Amino acid sequence: MNATINLEKKHIPVLLDELISIISPLYGGTFIDCTFGQGGYSKRILSNKNNRVVALDRDPETLIEAKKLLKKFKGRFRFENEKFSNINQLKISDHNLKAIIFDLGYSTSQITDLKKGLSFNSKGKLNMKLGKNFFSADDVINKMSYENLNKVFKFFGDEQKSKIIARNIIKKRLKKKILSEDLVNIIESVKKKYSKINKSTKVYQSLRILVNNEVSQLIFGLINSFKLLPVGGILAVVTFHSLEDRIVKFFFKNYSDEKKSSRYLPELKENKKIFKIINKKPITPSSQEIKLNPSSRSAKLRCVQKIYNHNNFDEFLKKFEYLLKIEEFADQL
Ligand SMILES: C[S@@+](CC[C@H](N)C(=O)[O-])C[C@H]1O[C@@H](n2cnc3c(N)ncnc32)[C@H](O)[C@@H]1O
């Protein structure tokens, strides 16, 4: 983040105008903001007096900002400190639900809060818990087996040096508990070649994904949002890394009119098209937005409209079963 632009480390909402232009024809109804953060999206939607917002965030610290909105938009704003995979447990009796929105990842204030330990700039005991977690990055790095660490770094971080980093972690922790700065040193001692991104980025990303169950959160967040959304409603997701984008892209394309079934086969019942894709290519930030907010550079916005009800997501679950299995490694900690 450019310090001259964002001195207070406030979160700048990403692709806000683009998102609003997609849901705005639907103005006048209820919108669910699954990732409230600093409330950038919620505030803009609430600026129209005919709108109501139900917002969720797993991080209890987001309640500070949510309280301001509860006061300002009395009766039109509701907040739940809840994980979005549980969206279907919210009692939403509103039949005027227009869109469900996800802005995945972390807000600037979470990344720069060193006690959350999301960044490789953090020192001391590893953490990475966002809220409503059962284990931390400290448990993973100091307890997980070599085989499992290797898979976490490889599949959640796309880290090419996963094996040697995992091996060095095991060696080091025989002597002492591994802290955040030790982990960075281990990674840097292995990755000597010049790299455009920080050498620790991929390992830290993989740990954040594991600790916060990002894969199952996203998969069940999407499925349960779909179930809650009425036909005609919009599902919009902003992703920040290739793993989450792959999951969203598959979900939308596989169950949409984009999916090509073989012309030699009769149309299968299971192949029901449940989405109309709104933007065929993901919407990405303009060069101006990236200049103003460099953290937005990897953002991708994908949107669909629900056109049919459906209850069988086995194909989606099967496709990403191998990732869900890696998440389960944490059960052994
Ligand atoms: C990128 S920020 C959202 C920023 C927000 N759109 C804004 O404009 O201020 C992502 C937020 O999602 C929350 N989050 C991440 N995973 C979540 C989950 N599984 N359930 C609920 N909230 C989650 C994080 O705590 C964080 O506050």
Image: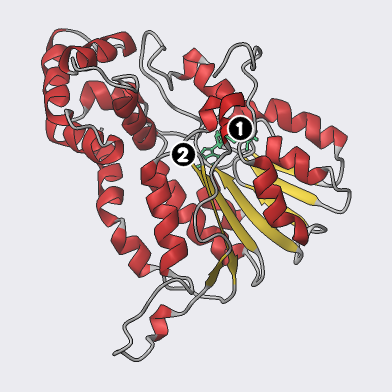
Q: Which of 174 and 216 is in front in this view?
A: 216
Q: What residue is rendered at 34% in x and 68% in y?
A: 315
In the rendered view, would you say 300 is above or below 226?
above
In the rendered view, would you say 52 is above or below 297?
below
Q: Which residue lies furthest to the front in this view?
A: 287
Q: Which mark is residue 289?
A: 1
**Hey, what amino acid is under mark 2?**
Phe
Image coordinates of residue 34 in percent, x first then y, are 60, 46
Label 2 CB less than 8 angstroms from ligand 1? yes
- Sequence-first tag of 1 and 2: 2
Q: Give the left or right position of residue 323, taking residue 286 as reference.
A: left
Give yes or no for contact between labels 1 and 2 (Cβ–Cβ under 8 Å).
no
Q: What residue is rendered at 33% in x and 30% in y?
A: 207
Q: Residue 240 carries which label?
A: 2
Q: Judging from the image, what secondary structure is the residue with disc 2 in? A: loop
Q: Is residue 213 visible?
A: yes
Q: Which of 23 and 196 is in front in this view?
A: 196
Label 1 and label 2: CA atoms lie apart by 15 Å
Q: How crowded is mark 2: few (under 14 residues within 10 Å), some or many (20 or more)?
A: some
In the rendered view, would you say 64 is above or below 76?
above
Q: Nearer the viewer, residue 163 or 125?
A: 163
Image coordinates of residue 317 in percent, x first then y, are 34, 61
